[in-house]
Image (cartoon, coloured by chain):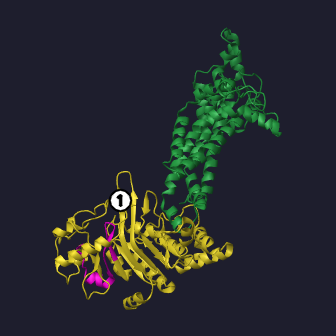
Amino acid sequence: MLLFGASITFLVIRAGPLDPVSAILGPQGDPQAYNAIRDQLGLDQPLWQQYIDYMVNMFTLNLGESWVLQPDTSVYSLVVSYAPRTIWLGFWAVLIAIFVGIPLGFYAGLNPNTFSDYIASFGGIVWRAMPNFWLAVILMSVLSQSEKFFFGFNWEGFLYATNVTGPPPLGDLTSVDGFLKALKKIAPAALVLGSASMGNEMRIGRTAVLETVNSNFIETARAKGVPPRSLVWKHIFRNALIPLVPIITGEAFILLGGSVLVESVFDISGIGYLFFQAIKNGDMPLVGSLMFIFILLVVLINIMQDFLYTIIDPRVGYDGGA
Amino acid sequence: MAQKETSAVRSEEEPLLSVDNLQTAFFTDKEVIRAVDGVNFDIHRGETVGIVGESGSGKSVTARSIMGLVDSPGRVLSGSSITFRGEELTEKSEKQYRSLRGSDIAMVFQDPLTSLNPVYTVGNQIKEALRLHQDLRGAAATEEAINLLEAVGIPDASRRVKEYPHEFSGGMRQRAVIAMALACDPELLICDEPTTALDVTIQAQILELLQDLQEERDLAIMFITHDMGVIAEISDRVNVMYAGEIVESAPVEELFENPRHPYTQGLLQSIPGNQPDADRLSTIEGDVPTPNEPAGYCRFEPRCPKAFEDCTRVHPASVEVNDEADDHTAACLLYPEDASQAEAVELHEQLESEREVSER
């Protein structure tokens, strides 16, 4: 899987219209310098040679150096400085989705066709239908003039003075102050990023609960005299989680990829932003390494998903049986 | 099971469960469906009462009404009475009902493949019942669960108790469900088509198991099925249901030898083995009507080969089929057969006027 992904990445980068040399030189480069740099970067070598070098480097985690964006900085140090912001953003986006979307969905599923169910379901659809970038822009403009909309409530001055946009201060997460500050900074972006997944998880959670409630074993449990509270938590909850596992992990990917937009709107220079810039400028090693990291993450999340399955659903085992 | 004994006991002892004028209706936007409409029957200790009828005749709703498990938009109507050991069940609160469910009245459902929770071990689910009603926990509960599984004939129970439902076969699962139902030593076991989803050899095993358990524990069993063969095998007494009403009630042998209600006669005739020489299987034409209004007529009349004019006008009450008959009732204007037809119709009219029909 890793091999395949890395190979495809290589192919796409090399076969594509990326030309790092002209990016370094700018539009007025003379051919002499062009060839020199080309030679220096090793781009004149035969393709198979480049491929082998690339693969060996990837798998020995020798990620190389940035060529264009920040010349002579190692990709590794770039990733280390950019990644935490994205992780921080993605983490809260996923948490918001899980801790708002799923409980809402379960609540709606347990009280089907009531007024609150309709409110929640309708909200879920609307929430789900709002595009990321649109919501991001709206939220940003509303929050930056919050006094006008919320009767004098000032978001920028609330708790800590911050701008709506800009990267979160992650230097000092261990203290309560620093943590809250970083949290507040990331909240609008995380809300936007998590919104689609939140709506999704709500809808699917609702369906899953409805399906479980109407299944026979719930009736058997009721006939056994199980009180409603334990019926919900023991018998319904765990069964309804099963269809949600792939949704949650699937969304974790989207959060990684989809963060590019949100990161640029909120001016959070995270991985997504870095990736975007790297592609634009033809920074081959950076693009290749980031792709490699993404592939690695996808594989890891998949493994985690399978692992979660085996915990929740005993019918899925390691031995491939059942 | 010994027929003579139970009928002797019947007259002396007060019934364990007594259902009187049970009416359960489902209130939908379009109409009110009276799924169970004025059902009366008794169950005594150690007795098996069978309820037969076509799909949609209200058998399962009767069972759920007794368990207090009728879901909205359905409701047991006022005027219905279900007494269990002399206690009125219809007035119980949900909480009081819960302590009864599983401990005194237990239920086994139709489909064993889906009636166990797939994410918990079989042992866990049996122990849940033990914990709820007998406050058994930990090792004691595990041991009791193993004993129960052994009692229902599951070999290697100490290993099986730790397995999940998907590791059990269909027949095994139904045994496990029965073990779960028996966990708290109920007095009444309601079986809602427990053998329908199983193949014939397993069916026979389960029926045998139920009979053994009944003898051992003096269980009263209410057995719901649409399979006449199964009913003949297991019941002491049979109630035939049609469109929410009990149309005939008799001890099992009497019912099979002398079916009186035209519907029962039709049912028995349509068993393939009863007419080996016929070219075509005789059937009852038509479908079960949906009982969506209180009946002022006989609900079987459109399909009845013996229907006459008064059938569209008078709703039949349950009466003894004739003077000699002991304990054999039918709800049909043809009976009691020793009275003239005009007299019989008059009797039914009079009984009907005394019946209490609830609208809500």
| Looking at the image, residue B138 lies above or below residue A283 | below
Question: Which structural element holds mark 1?
Answer: strand
Toward the viewer: A312 or A165?
A165
Q: In the picture provided, is B40 more to the left or to the right than B337?
A: right
| Looking at the image, residue B205 lies above or below residue B314 | below
> Splitting the image into 4 quarters, where does residue A292 fall?
top right
Report the number of numbered marks: 1
> Splitting the image into 4 quarters, where does residue B18 fall?
bottom left
Q: Look at the image and say whether residue B255 sits in the magenta stretch.
A: yes
Q: The green chain is which one?
A: A
x, y (%) of residue B166?
52, 64
Quadrant showing the N terminus of chain B: bottom left
Q: Which residue is drawn at 26% across and 84% down?
A: B257
The span picked out in magenta is B239-265
x, y (%) of residue A189?
66, 31
Residue named by callout 1: B33
The answer to whether residue A53 is seen in the rendering is: no
Could you tell me which chain the residue with mark 1 belongs to?
A: B
Amino acid type at circle 1 is: Ile
Quadrant showing the C terminus of chain B: bottom left
The answer to whether residue B50 is seen in the rendering is: yes
Q: Look at the image and say whether residue B109 sits in the magenta stretch.
A: no
Label 1 CA crowd tier, 10 Å (few <14, some 14–19, many 20+): some
Toward the viewer: A11 or B261?
B261
Q: Which residue is drawn at 35% across and 66% down?
A: B357
Q: Colour of chain B?
A: yellow
| Looking at the image, residue A313 lies above or below residue B343 | above
x, y (%) of residue A80?
76, 33
x, y (%) of residue B87?
50, 76
